[in-house]
Amino acid sequence: MLVAPATIALTIAAWALLGRAQPQHPPNPATPQPPAAPAIGQMNLNLVVLDPAHGGPDAGAILGSNVLEKDITMAMAVRLRAALGAAGFTVIATRDANSSDPLTQLSTDQRAAIANRTHAVACIVLHATNTGSGVHIYTSALSPSDPAEEADVDFPSPFAPVPWESAQAESVQQSLRLADDMRTALAAGNLPVAVGKASLRPLDNLMCPAVAVELAPLAATGGATPVTDAGYQQRVAVALAAALQAWRAHAVPPAPPAQVPQ
């Protein structure tokens, strides 16, 4: 279930890593190491980061008798990883199991740091709820940043301090387009979908096109399909994989115009 974060007064300044600002976090031996990031200014069009929310001692919402949100987000991540793999994507997940050891539990800041080092084509935060019906898609409520205001031609520098709480502002417009591709694909799969905006971790801290996808029961005549239903989860995973294929095509920069011989 999505929960808005508490207000944090301190802005964290970060240094640029491979041309993009990165947060400074203490080393954590449990933190998965992503592959090397692509060249400066490029997006890894075949890489998706999945963040199954909660995990470990953080159970998330209680969705029913013996049904924990952390288990549903993990199940969805497994299905989505398989669907994305079949579509030719490489997937990095911020967790691969529901360990009960709190020492292996990454904070939302650490999860965002993993994603921010990859230059992924998309980052997807997975949640689940018993409220509403179908699939809820959220983009950050942050206002898009203005590149013209951020540019400083008099003092160009390879380092750029970035407010940690508004890191997603740079990618908000792309995230909105990604959400639209997801809405189209889910609707094509006859899955009800609602799109909105939310301020939450780690969505606001991600420096890639990013959305939060929240799975709710599927309302139907004769009774709702619960979020635990494997067939329902698979339908959503297949639709999201199709959406990311469409998004990958949209994210490819246009080819330069062909040179006409003189």
Image (cartoon, rainbow, N blue to C red):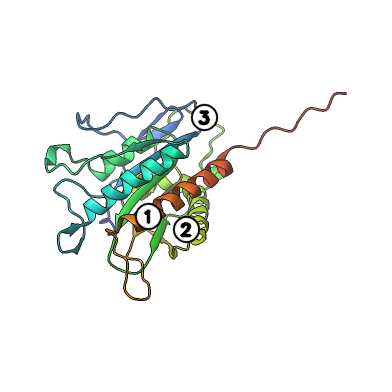
Query: Residue visible at 42% across and 27% down?
Result: 37
- Disc 3 and disc 1: Cα gap in Å? 37 Å
Tell me the quarter of the image containing the C terminus. top right
Closest to the observer: 34 or 132? 132
Image quarter (top left, top right, bottom left or bottom right) of the N terminus:
bottom left
- Proximity of marks 1 and 2: CB atoms separated by less than 8 Å: no
Between 98 and 256, the residue placed more toward the observer is: 98
How dense is the environment of label 2, judged by Cα within 10 Å: few (below 14), some, or many (20 and up)?
many
Q: Which residue is mark 3?
A: 156
* Sequence order check, earlier mark of 1 and 2: 2
Q: Is residue 247 shown left or right of residue 218?
A: right
Of the residues shown, which amino acid type is indicated by label 3?
Pro
The earlier-in-sequence mark between 3 and 1 is: 3
State yes or no: discs 3 and 2 in contact (Cβ < 8 Å). no
Residue 177 image position (x, y, % from top left): 53, 52
Say which mark, if any, is on residue 143.
Answer: none
Q: Is residue 30 left or right of residue 171?
A: left
Residue 172, position as x, y percentages in the image:
47, 50
Residue type, mark 2 in image = Leu
Check disc 1 and report the residue beneath it: 213
Please tell me the numbered disc located at residue 186: 2
Q: Residues within 10 Å of mark 3 (few under 14, many from 20)?
A: few
| SS at mark 1 in the image | strand
Q: What residue is drawn where x is 45% and y is 46%?
A: 241
Q: Say what amino acid the circle numbered 1 marks.
A: Val
Residue at x-position 32% and y-position 46%: 77
Q: Secondary structure at mark 2?
A: helix
Mark 1 neighbour class, 10 Å CA radius: few under 14, some 14 to 19, many 20 or more: many
Evaluate if marks 3 and 1 touch, with contact meaning CB atoms under 8 Å apart.
no
